[in-house]
């Protein structure tokens, strides 16, 4: 019999359910058994053991993110080259602007909408009266550098490698990127469901599960609605520039959207996105250039998804996130996401360091964000690939004859 493969989404869903149920059982034991009893002690040991794994994995994430930027963003920058000219700069500029606007759009809508459906400081209020579980081991695994330093090094090395004969340096960073990619795909991603499980178990045992579950459903629904609304705005603009019916063009991209939703990868949907883009009347030359490039640099849907979730978690934890602070976060996140298509859940991985260093997220907040983010992973990549078609429409208007 062939080995049954379970998707990451299914694993995360199973981890959330089992962790929540086990945590509720632990909570019942804590309330029913005396503090010095065998049942109480066993459950307390298990929760603290899970908390130990949770803390160590969170520190591993903090350690690996700068390496991800160095190993994946740097090759992506010098891989663009200097021979493509104005069209390359135009596509990258539009993709970056679209990604930034997506984050700011999601931030504005989320901050205006969430106060009406979520309770401000709800999680922090629950945490005040909740049981606190301490890990058995708390190793301080310090990263080699912070995320901003890694981004600066990546830009410096990547841009210089375009103009100098740095084959040895390119080869080193390319191979280092493969090492980082393998570490994430073989170690970090497989352990992520366990990370979510331990977080949900502790959260359930401490009495914060009900608030979290209600929050997740509302946040995911809001994120899906905002991503679709942003696509409509994109195609209204692109259709107006190209002189085509925006809604017809958007309808033609539905196969790419559905494929991206099911596959959960922008890069894997490139052939489908190309076919849908050609159906919108975009020239084959422009399509074959823009779609593969945008699959690596245009992450509007993933940024909307991350922004919506981050704002919700910060709001529920009572952590204020001002607009200037979040604007700086989005500007850097749009650069960091260049590495994301090469790694499963890459946008989430690339954002961890920025969330903690710029927005003040704690490991507990990051774990909660991951649980909600991974609960429905498909709508981010689906929005990404559909938005690539909108960029191709606009670029084709100016570069078709050239």
Image (cartoon, rainbow, N blue to C red):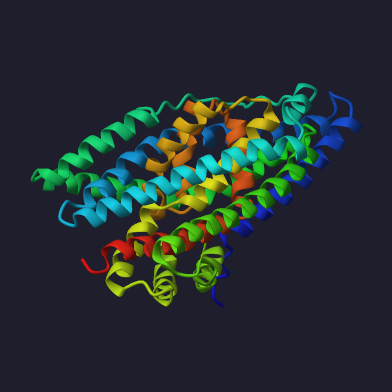
Q: Is residue 348 above or below residue 388?
A: above
Q: Considering depth in this image, is 242 or 318 the residue closer to the camera?
A: 242
Q: Kindly give the residue lying farthest to the left in the view shown.
A: 165
Residue at the location (78% across, 47% down)?
21
Q: Quadrant of the C terminus?
A: bottom left
**Image side of residue 342 versus residue 129, left or right:** left
Residue 281: x and y in percent read: 39, 75
Residue 149: x and y in percent read: 33, 28
Q: Is residue 284 above or below residue 264?
A: below
**Image side of residue 286 versus residue 125, left or right:** left
Residue 295: x and y in percent read: 39, 59
Q: Considering depth in this image, is 259 or 112 the residue closer to the camera?
A: 112
Q: Quadrant of the N terminus?
A: bottom right
Question: Does residue 294 appear in the picture of this structure?
Answer: yes
Residue at the location (73% across, 27% down)?
121
**Image side of residue 171 versus residue 372, left or right:** left
Q: Considering depth in this image, is 232 or 240 the residue closer to the camera?
A: 240
Residue at the location (44% across, 41% down)?
350
Q: Is residue 398 above or below residue 196?
A: below
Q: Number of numbered discs present?
A: 0
Q: Kindly give the residue lying farthest to the top in the view shown.
A: 128
In the figure, residue 132 lies in which quadrant? top right
Q: Considering depth in this image, is 9 or 248 the residue closer to the camera?
A: 248
Question: Does residue 144 appear in the picture of this structure?
Answer: no
């Amino acid at each position: 019999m062939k080995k049954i493969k379970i998707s990451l989404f299914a694993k995360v869903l199973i981890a959330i359910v089992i962790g929540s149920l086990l945590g509720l059982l632990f909570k019942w034991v804590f309330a029913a058994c005396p503090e010095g009893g065998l049942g109480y002690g066993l459950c307390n040991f298990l929760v603290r053991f899970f908390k130990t794994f949770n803390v160590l994995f969170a520190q591993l994430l903090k350690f690996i993110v700068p390496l991800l930027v160095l190993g994946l963003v740097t090759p992506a920058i010098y891989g663009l080259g200097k021979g493509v000219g104005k069209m390359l700069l135009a596509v990258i500029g539009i993709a970056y602007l679209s990604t930034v606007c997506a984050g700011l759009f999601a931030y504005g809508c989320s901050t205006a909408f969430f106060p009406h459906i979520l309770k401000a400081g709800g999680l922090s209020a629950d945490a005040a009266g909740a049981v606190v579980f301490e890990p058995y081991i708390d190793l301080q695994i310090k990263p080699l550098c912070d995320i901003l330093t890694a981004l600066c090094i990546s830009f410096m090395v990547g841009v210089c490698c375009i103009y100098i004969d740095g084959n040895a340096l390119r080869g080193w960073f390319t191979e280092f990127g493969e090492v980082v990619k393998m570490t994430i795909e073989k170690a970090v991603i497989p352990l992520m469901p366990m990370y979510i499980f331990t977080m949900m178990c502790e959260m359930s045992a401490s009495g914060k599960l009900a608030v979290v579950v209600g929050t997740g459903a509302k946040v995911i629904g809001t994120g899906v609605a905002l991503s679709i609304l942003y696509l409509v705005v994109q195609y209204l603009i692109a259709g107006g520039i190209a002189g085509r019916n925006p809604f017809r063009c958007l309808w033609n991209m539905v196969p790419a959207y559905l494929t991206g939703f099911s596959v959960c990868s922008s890069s894997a949907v490139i052939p489908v996105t190309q076919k849908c883009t050609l159906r919108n009347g975009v020239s084959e030359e422009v399509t074959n250039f823009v779609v593969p490039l945008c699959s690596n640099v245009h992450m509007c849907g993933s940024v909307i998804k991350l922004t919506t979730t981050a704002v919700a978690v910060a709001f529920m934890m009572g952590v204020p996130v001002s607009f200037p602070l979040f604007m700086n976060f989005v500007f850097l996140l749009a650069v960091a996401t260049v590495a994301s298509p090469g790694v499963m859940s890459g946008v989430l991985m690339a954002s961890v360091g920025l969330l903690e260093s710029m927005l003040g997220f704690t490991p507990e907040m990051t774990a909660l964000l991951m649980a909600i983010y991974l609960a429905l992973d498909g709508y981010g990549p689906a929005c990404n690939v559909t938005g690539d078609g909108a960029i191709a429409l606009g670029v084709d208007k100016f570069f078709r004859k050239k």
